[in-house]
Amino acid sequence: MSLSNEQVGRLAHLARLAVSDDAIDATRAQLDDILALIAQMQAIDTNGIEPMSHPQELAARLREDAVTETDRRAAFQAIAPHAEAGLYLVPKVIE
């Protein structure tokens, strides 16, 4: 499939791109190459091939689930303006 310069200009307008008349031939050639690659990929028979979740087989690196911070709840409760029974008390905002 080959695009005309008018089609490239319309696509550029729809994409809100400013393509000068000097660059329209180069842009058309690049778009033709992209469309040719898409046609080549669509011609490949992919029946029976399971889709991949990622193009590379990667293993997720998981860190050990371990506590790294000390418990400072009592210190935070002590400096809170209003706290009761381990809860922070805040003003009512909805009546």
Image (cartoon, helix red, strand yellow):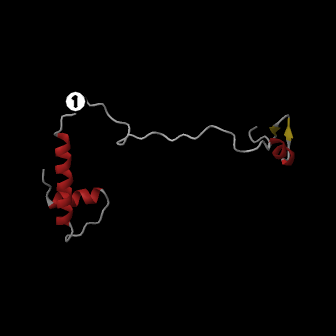
Q: Specify the farthest residue to the bottom.
A: 22
Residue 64 position (above or below residue 32): above
- Which residue was labeled with disc 1? 47
User: For the point 72% across and 45% down, which residue is it?
Assistant: 69
Residue under the point 81% across and 46% down: 76
In depth, the one of 53 and 29 nearer the eye is 53
The quadrant the C terminus occupies is top right
**Element class at badge 1:** loop
Is 79 left, or right, of 16 in this rendering? right
Q: Looking at the picture, which amino acid does disc 1 mark?
A: Asn
Residue 37: give x, y in percent of width and height: 19, 49
**Crowd around label 1: few <14 · some 14–19 · many ≥20 (10 Å):** few
The outermost residue toward the front is 64
Residue 78: x and y, percent? 87, 45
Tell me: 91 left or right of 18: right
In the image as oriented, which residue stretches furthest toward the top? 48
Pick the front one: 34 or 13: 34
Specify whether 49 is left or right of 74. left
The residue positioned 26% from the left and 31% from the top of the image is: 49
Q: Is residue 89 left or right of residue 64?
A: right
Query: Residue 70: where, in percent of width, then height?
Result: 76, 44
Q: Measured from the top left, where is residue 35 in percent x and y?
A: 19, 50
74 versus 16 height, above or below: above
| Residue 24 occupies quadrant | bottom left
Q: Is residue 19 above or below residue 37?
A: below
State the count of labels: 1
